[in-house]
Amino acid sequence: MRYRTLGGTGIEVSAYCLGTMMFQDGCNSDHDDCVRIIHAALDQGINFVDTADMYGQGESEEIVGKALRGRRDDVVLATKVRFQMGEGRNRSGNSRRWILKAVDDSLRRLNTDWIDLYQVHRPDDSTDVEETLSVLSDLVHQGKIRAFGCSTFPAEEIVEAHHVSERRGLGRFRTEQPPYSILARGIEASVLPVCQRYGMGVLVWSPLAFGFLTGKYRKYQPIDLSTGRPTIRPERFDPAIAENAAKLDVVEQLVELAENIGCTLPQLAIAFTVAHPAVTSAIIGPRTMPQLEDLLKGAALTLDDAALDRIDEIVPPGTNLYNPNAPLPPRSLTDNARRRRPLTDRAAA
């Protein structure tokens, strides 16, 4: 396993980070099996574990807490806050009120006294970013978290946050967690360069493109939309949709490339993400032990320039073949009031 420094934090983390979104009811609900998978990952050199409070409404954090008993000091532990937890108002978002409650809940579920990396899961345009940075800075001073970062923030909001931190003398986002894969390279244009400019660590999610780069879904094979990931987002797998047909064409070319290199398609896909100089670690999210074992076999894989050039030919740099953040588009696109002047103003103009 290779190790890298997480931005400017001085913390060394493995180039593969174990994501635990699959450890919950509806995915892998066998807690003992999940603990075995986490232990196997740690035994193979992974020292970076990422979870979130909203994964299974806290179930994933509870599983991670069980797995890290007796091993906590050797693990860099990351979790996230933002999404709705339980019923009622003010149980989500990036406000001081909610974050102070959410971090204590996460600490309890994780059975730990501190969180190494506490991440804001998504932007929250109802909360001033200064409010969020202020409470996160306080949590660092209190010793409840060691560092904090953001997840799936657009480049302009990362820049704004850094400017606010500098102007107000607050702690700053040390990391960003964006979606990144061969099929979704859009962050290469601005997010990754911005992270490099500010010395941020980057841990990327969905390097297998929502399962499309597992090799399970092929152009000339029927795709069962009634099981697995297609049941969650069937529109991402239906071959009748032009976007998916294009992805299937790409998969065939990548499978050929992987065979020529002597690796599997998932191994190729993850090796591609960690080849970018801005990327610190790629999050792998196995549901089963065999999935983990296959992914870890590629941990030492390094792609040469010829392989990376071929990938660039198949999917040009900066290109998204699908929108990896489609479930959560910004309100600037979904709220008509943010894109249209009031009718009276339009008439006056």
Image: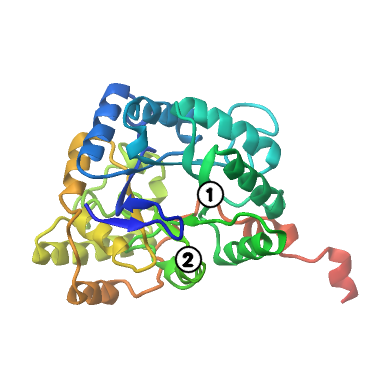
Whole-angstrom CA distance, mark 2 to mark 1, is 14 Å
The picture quadrant where one finds residue 63 is top left
Name the residue tied to disc 1: 148
For the point 84% across and 64% down, the residue is 343
For the point 11% across and 65% down, the residue is 261
Q: How many marks?
A: 2
Q: Amino acid at mark 2?
A: Gly
For the point 34% across and 42% down, the residue is 229
Q: Position of residue 231 (x, y in %)?
A: 37, 39
Q: Position of residue 42 (x, y in %)?
A: 25, 38
Which mark is on residue 185? none
Q: Secondary structure at mark 1?
A: strand
Q: Position of residue 278 (x, y in %)?
A: 39, 66
Pick whichever, 311 or 20, lies toward us: 20
Label 2 crowd (10 A; few <14 / some 14-19 / many >=20): some
Label 1 crowd (10 A; few <14 / some 14-19 / many >=20): many
Would residue 30 be seen by someone viewing this image from the given angle?
no
Q: Position of residue 287 (x, y in %)?
A: 28, 36
Horizontal relation, residue 137 to residue 19: left or right? right
Would residue 11 be seen by someone viewing this image from the given angle?
yes
The picture quadrant where one finds residue 251 is bottom left
- Dot 2 or dot 1, earlier in sequence: 1
Horizontal relation, residue 297 to residue 27: left or right? left
Horizontal relation, residue 220 to residue 320: left or right? left
Name the residue tied to disc 2: 199
Pick whichever, 157 or 166, lies toward us: 166
> Is residue 29 positioned above or below 190 on the image?
above
Q: Secondary structure at mark 2?
A: loop
The picture quadrant where one finds residue 262 is bottom left
Pick whichever, 156 or 253, lies toward us: 156
> Is residue 65 positioned above or below 41 on the image?
above
